Amino acid sequence: MAYDSFNILRSTAVPLPIENVDTDQIIPARFLKATERVGFGDNLFRDWRYNPDNTPKADFVLNDPTYRGKILVGGKNFGSGSSREHAAWAIYDYGFRCVISSFFADIFRNNCLNVGVLPVQISAEFLERIFAEIYANPDTELEVNLPEQTVTLLATGEKESFEINSYKKENMMNGFDDIDYLLNIKSDIEEFSKTLPL
Amino acid sequence: MSKTLFDKVWDAHVVRKIEGGPDVLFIDRHLIHEVTSPVAFLGLRNRGIRVLYPERTFATADHNTPTINQDKPVQDPLSANQLKALEENTKMYGIRHWGLGHYKNGIVHVIGPENGITQPGATIVCGDSHTSTHGAFGAIAFGIGTSEVEMVLSTQCIMQPKPKKMRITINGALGKGVLPKDVALFIISKLTTSGATGYFVEYAGSVFEQMSMEGRMTVCNLSIEMGARGGMIAPDQTTFDYIEGREFSPKGADWDKAMAYWKNLKTDEGAVFDKELTFDGSEIEPMITYGTNPGMGMGITHEIPNAEQVEGGKATYEKSLGYMGFHEGEPMVGKKIDYVFVGSCTNGRIEDFRAFASLVKGRHKADDVTVWLVPGSHVVEEQIRKEGILDILTEAGFTLRQPGCSACLAMNDDKIPAGKYAVSTSNRNFEGRQGPGARTLLASPLVAAAAAVTGRVTDPRTLIQ
């Protein structure tokens, strides 16, 4: 499915300094019953965000108007657990385009890249600095520069670079997905299938 | 050059390497279910493309199916709609479908091996993180997202950077009452939930060599819980004996050809891993978790560690214990239990029910505990009857439900109520995993049995001869 291309994103950010945020928290299983990819943002962090009677929990960051923006900043090992791509859809659908953390779970990272959410892994120290700056000034802006592969705290100029493979980077910058690539080499795949050992 | 088992299987499936990018990996077998496939089929329709090799994909309904009254219409309209979508999609694209009510229906990671679909040296994917289960046969098997399900349907390939390699070796004899689930929970407790992220794991050593296929599946199943994409065990005679004669296993000359290939599927002498870990099997106790991720586990006789003793932030640790209603320094043994769940792709196989029955035999279900016993498939259910296990369970006051994922992720009606404690043989103790507010203690079928007959967290070794 096509997504918006990603180049340079400047935005305030939403802090979620919890470690091991698993995909069951990002979107609980009971909200996976759709047969279309619509409306998942409403249930992003459902059980942290809403009480059982569906009233918002005032102390959860997404319900706090102080914090907003297109960047979600999470604690270490973000996105562990289930392979549900719905977690990445929910983040995208809510309006985030980038998740910053000091460590990501594998499948979640892959899913993000496939749906147009940029996962940005930075050092634990820089992550702490970003949390501190956001808490000191919720209006502080971050710049995520994909072509340069850098994250910058604009108020102080502190900057760190991040890794992304060149193929995925190109895809993100152009809004391409892997299926386009694979469909283009379909005849190679069919030839290859004849050479399998079994 | 010396190669690892993982290298051999991976390299045989690389269609092409992309400079500075992922490998294009050919997928031999693709398993799908009702929850993570509908949007992929929608994608095919939007692009106007067909399924390239429909015979390489197998469909089952498991995640949101009811575990009682399966012969009646599914009550939840959203679940019913997903089941209908799977039925229609598989029909439209010519994919084999073992839906609700079919005699081969069951949990995707139980029916794959059961039918001989899972084979050594194969690449196997499914839109489910516990696809790592199939690595027990020496396959490369891992979970994928829905975009990748669409890729496999349309081109039989996905694009993956080759992971790093880790070997975990465990030798030594396992103690009384220690099951494969305990071995896995022990490893995860040592590595944490992110300790193997970026790696594909090979399990080696006498502990795994002596394990049954069911046990190996339990261990490989839980690889994802330490962050690994998957885990695998070199195929041996135990593997070949399990596969032979199953519906989709090779027959006749094809079997001989396969065996010749499969026998070479092991790590060469001198092959190098990016990381090697070794543990002593005799140190492993029956395990139990006390927190909200599978890494928060310990020997059942231990006390809950203090925040200073565990890796990670204090705030996260306190949030986790707060959710569980537990405190640092408390013992787990003796804690009151409300529910017991035996089942899931982790522990829903025949051996798990044999273990459960071996302990409850001659005892009786504790009055104040609700126990859900959910076989992983109809084949498992049938075997439970055939072996007389059902009689033992019935005599002890238990009933058997119908197959499905059930309370492992509580997508159907099998939800643990808020605040209640469940000893569960499943794979995740995340907040709300078994129902909003539910509190999960992960453990083996023996620990589950001990809880079921005592109503408390109980060391099963005190109940077995």
Image: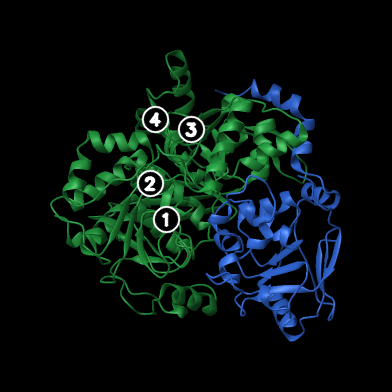
Q: Colour of chain A?
A: blue
Residue at figure coordinates x 38%, y 38% from the top left = B377
Residue B94's x, y, as percent?
A: 60, 24
Are labels 2 and 3 on one chain?
Answer: yes
Q: Amino acid at mark 1?
A: Thr
Residue B342's x, y, as percent?
A: 33, 51
Residue A183's x, y, as percent?
A: 76, 32
Q: Amino acid at mark 3?
A: Leu
Q: Amino acid at mark 4?
A: Tyr
Q: Colour of chain B?
A: green
Q: Is residue B412 above or below residue B418?
A: above
Please tell me whether mark 2 or mark 4 is closer to you in this view: 4
The residue that mark 1 highlights is: B278
Marks 1 and 2, how far apart in space? 9 Å
The residue that mark 3 highlights is: B265
Q: Which colouring convention does the figure follow?
A: by chain
Q: Residue furthest bottom?
A: A136
Q: Tag 1, which secondary structure?
A: strand
**In front here: B129 or B262?**
B129
Q: Which mark is residue B205?
A: 2
Cβ atoms at labels 1 and 2 below 8 Å apart? yes
Crowdedness of circle 1 by 10 Å Cα count: few (<14), some, many (20+)? some
Residue B42 is left or right of residue B235, and the answer is right
